[in-house]
Image (cartoon, helix red, strand yellow):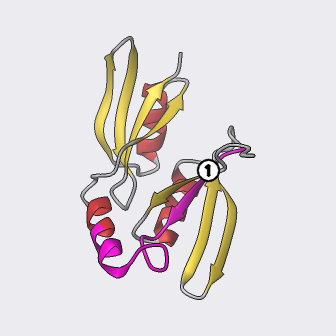
Amino acid sequence: MSKGIGVLGLYVLDQSEALDFYVGKLGFVVHADHTNGNYRWLTVKHPNQPGLELGLFLPQEPVLDAATARTMREMVAKGAMPPLVLVVDDCRASYDALKAKGVEFTQEPIARYGGVDANFRDPSGNAWKMIQGK
């Protein structure tokens, strides 16, 4: 019987660059970093959610065939993947702190829908929405 979701996968274009971003800028911690040939199993965890890992994976064989891997790299680079959502206590303060660490935002904090949100991308092009929790 299933126990639930343990790893959410995210395609990245450069795992070392992604690792620097997620650990150095967003404050995630490394959970697993293993290689098997040219395949690297790399996962990080948010310190407040120790039961859920974010897999930072390359779109590559053997998971995908070569043509699909190429298409997925192009899609990631264009920012075409669905956004992930980061919940924060104070969107404007988090925006200032992340911006000071070099995170590039595509939208400054805006008050709407009864809250405050901002958008940024990781170095691969993956979109993130940062939402002030209630």
- Whole-percent x and y of residue 20? 53, 63
- Whole-percent x and y of residue 14? 43, 71
Q: Residue at x 34, y 38 (%)?
A: 119
Q: For numbered disc 1, what is the local secondary structure? A: loop
Give the amino acid type for the residue marked by disc 1 in the picture: Phe
Residue, disc 1 = 28
Report the side of 62 relative to 47 (left or right): left
Name the foreground residue: 55 vs 27: 55
Q: Residue at x 55, y 80 (%)?
A: 39
Report the side of 43 relative to 60 (left or right): right
Name the foreground residue: 63 vs 123: 63
Report the side of 79 relative to 54 (left or right): left
Mark 1 neighbour density, 10 Å: few (under 14) some (14–19) many (20 or more): many
Q: Residue at x 75, y 46 (%)?
A: 1
The image quadrant that residue 60 belongs to is: bottom left
Establish if 89 lies above or below 83: above
Give yes or no for residue 105 being in the magenta stretch.
Answer: no
| Residue range highlighted in magenta | 51-71
